[in-house]
Amino acid sequence: MADQGDVRAVLEYVPRFRGKIFVVLIEAGLLPEPAIAESLLDLAAMEDVGVKLILGVLGGDLKDLYDWTLECEIMAARLTRPLGEPGAIEEAKAILGRGQTVVADASSNDPLDPQVVDFTLGIGAVKLIALLEEAILIDGEPVPAVRAADADALAISGTVTGAHLLQAAAEACRRGVPRVHVLNGRRQGVLVDELFSNEGVGTMIHADSYRQIRPLREEDIPELLGMIGRSVRRTKLVARNYEDIEARIGDYRVMTIDDNVVGCVALHDYPGENVAEVACLYVKLNHEGRGYGVDLVHHAEALAREKGIPRVFALTTRAADFFEKRVGYSPCDPDALPTTRRQQLEESGRDSKVFEKRL
């Protein structure tokens, strides 16, 4: 039985991918048949949930791969001309318009070459995905996300395997392709593991901000409440309702990865007291251990500095080590709290420890 967390992670992406166009390049002649077969089954599942697909065959027998798509019950139609030739975009749009997946000859192209990028832009794809024998590795490992702006410096650093692919992917992003994924096509299940999780298993190059911390929006409030509910029940976080958060919505920030909310923090001011509280710090379970909590705290501290606030404090029942050892806070007496906050703490009956930091 599939892990429930995995199923939920997949379901998060289904509505976002539905109706979108993905261009998927496959080095069919160089990859193991079991890996190709599993990738095609995964593509069939994506087709079922409404993703519009274009499969570009970089090597191997085009007819064989087309026959495989039919065996996997992909509703495929072959493009009558190679992917980069004039008229290919219009023909591909017509096939997609009929609800079919396009299978195209890309054997005369290098992965991510300008013709492939031209086609991707012309067809309006949101992702260009390459299943290759050679993947991009940095210090021997795939990197979940690389900004296009950082790619050239990385490519010449001497730490990158597949540096030419990294540079080509970055150029595709600079030209307007939102996301380029370069994946190890030998790895079975690589497509689902890459596309239906926030962290992925390959190397994604992106033009915009993949991971960011931004202000909370009103439409985020239900998700935030659902996210922190587990910690509220375990008394790690103070209980909050929709109205509480809405009333102080400007205090809250959320961390998003590929537009999915994965963590939150709040900075509550105490006017006239030259102090602010770092509160409602939470990172989703499947994103713990990656330093996101530290990033959220540092973001809240930066907001305090911008406001000219010289000191911040935090209350916690379970995260004393985190505040003291990871983000440099010091224990302090509850008497150091603003009067209203100290009264709230006393009335709550929570056995919270108090930490502070001078900025």
Image (cartoon, rainbow, N blue to C red):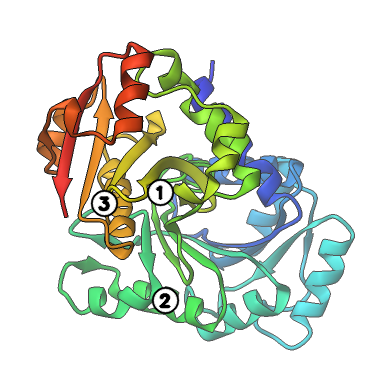
Between 173 and 22, the residue placed more toward the observer is: 173
Which residue does the numbered mark 2 point to in the structure image? Answer: 170
State the residue at coordinates (20%, 79%): 156
Specify the label residue 281 is tagged with: none
Q: Position of residue 136 (x, y in %)?
A: 32, 63
Q: Is residue 340 above or below residue 24?
A: above
Q: Earlier in the sequence, mark 2 or mark 1?
A: 2
- Residue 187, located in which quarter of the rendered image? top left
Residue type at numbered disc 2: Ala
Q: Is residue 352 left or right of residue 134?
A: left
Q: How many marks?
A: 3
Closer to viewer: mark 3 or mark 2: 3
Cα distance between the residues tagged 2 and 1 = 23 Å
Closer to viewer: mark 2 or mark 1: 2
Local SS, label 3: loop
Which residue does the numbered mark 3 point to in the structure image? Answer: 274
In the picture as drawn, the residue positioned furthest to the bottom comes out as: 86
Q: Earlier in the sequence, mark 1 or mark 3?
A: 1
Which residue does the numbered mark 1 point to in the structure image? Answer: 186
Local SS, label 2: helix
Local SS, label 1: loop
